[in-house]
Image (cartoon, rainbow, N blue to C red):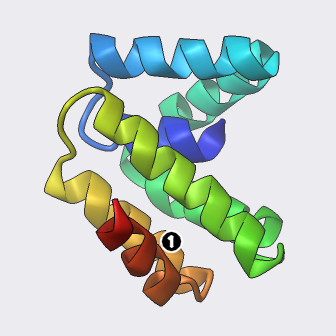
C-alpha cells in the first residue's frame, strides 16, 4: 500500500486516486496498511519519496524480479484507471524500477500495454 499511495500522492492526492487506494485496501483487507502508508507520507511530504524509496528498497528491492515487476506494473495499471498519468508519477516509478534493477522489464510491460 505504501508503493501505491506514494505514487498517487506524488503530485497531491485527488478524489479518483483516493477512491482507487480505498478500493485496493478493501480488496486486500489492507485498510490499516493504507492508513500507515498515508501517515508515513504525511509525516513529511517533502521527504516522503526518498524515505519511502529507502524503505521499499529494503522490503521490495530484495524480492525476486517477477514479484518486484508485479508490484510496480500493478501500480502503473491502477494509475491508468484514473484516465491519466503525470510525468512525475511515471518518473517516480521508473526511478524505483532502476533501483530494483527491473527498468528494462517495466518498459517492456508498459509497451505491451
Q: Is residue 14 above or below residue 111?
A: above
Is residue 62 or residue 42 the one in the foreground? 62
| Quarter-of-image position of residue 34 | top right
Quadrant of the rendering where the N terminus is positioned: top right
Total numbered labels placed on residues in the image: 1
| Quarter-of-image position of residue 17 | top left
| Residue 44 visible in the picture | no
Q: Residue at x 71, y 61 (%)?
A: 55
Q: Residue at x 55, y 33 (%)?
A: 43
Mark 1 crowd level (few <14, some 14–19, many ≥20, 10 Å Cα):
many
Dot 1 corresponds to which residue?
96
Identity of the residue furthest to the front in this view:
112
Q: Residue at x 62, y 68 (%)?
A: 69
Is residue 76 or residue 11 the one in the foreground? 76
Is residue 4 or residue 9 the one in the foreground? 4
Residue 33 x, y percent position in the rendering = 76, 26
Q: Residue at x 31, y 15 (%)?
A: 16
Apparent side of residue 15 relative to residue 32 in the rendered image (left or right): left
Apparent side of residue 43 relative to residue 104 in the rendered image (left or right): right
Q: Is residue 39 above or below residue 1?
A: above
Residue 82 x, y percent position in the rendering = 27, 26
Q: Which element is circle 1 on? A: helix
| Residue 1 visible in the picture | yes
Q: Is residue 18 above or below residue 43?
A: above
Residue 36 x, y percent position in the rendering = 71, 26
Quadrant of the rendering where the C terminus is positioned: bottom left
Residue 40 x, y percent position in the rendering = 62, 35
Amino acid at each position: 500500500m505504501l508503493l501505491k499511495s506514494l505514487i498517487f500522492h506524488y503530485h497531491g492526492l485527488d478524489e479518483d486516486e483516493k477512491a482507487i487506494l480505498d478500493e485496493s485496501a478493501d480488496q486486500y483487507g489492507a485498510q490499516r496498511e493504507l492508513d500507515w502508508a498515508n501517515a508515513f507520507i504525511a509525516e513529511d511530504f517533502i521527504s516522503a519519496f526518498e524515505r519511502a524509496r529507502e524503505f521499499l528498497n529494503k522490503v521490495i528491492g530484495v524480492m525476486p524480479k517477477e514479484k518486484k515487476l508485479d508490484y510496480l506494473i500493478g501500480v502503473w495499471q491502477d494509475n491508468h484507471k484514473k484516465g491519466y498519468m503525470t510525468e512525475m508519477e511515471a518518473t517516480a516509478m521508473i526511478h524505483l524500477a532502476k533501483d530494483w534493477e527491473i527498468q528494462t522489464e517495466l518498459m517492456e510491460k508498459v509497451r505491451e500495454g
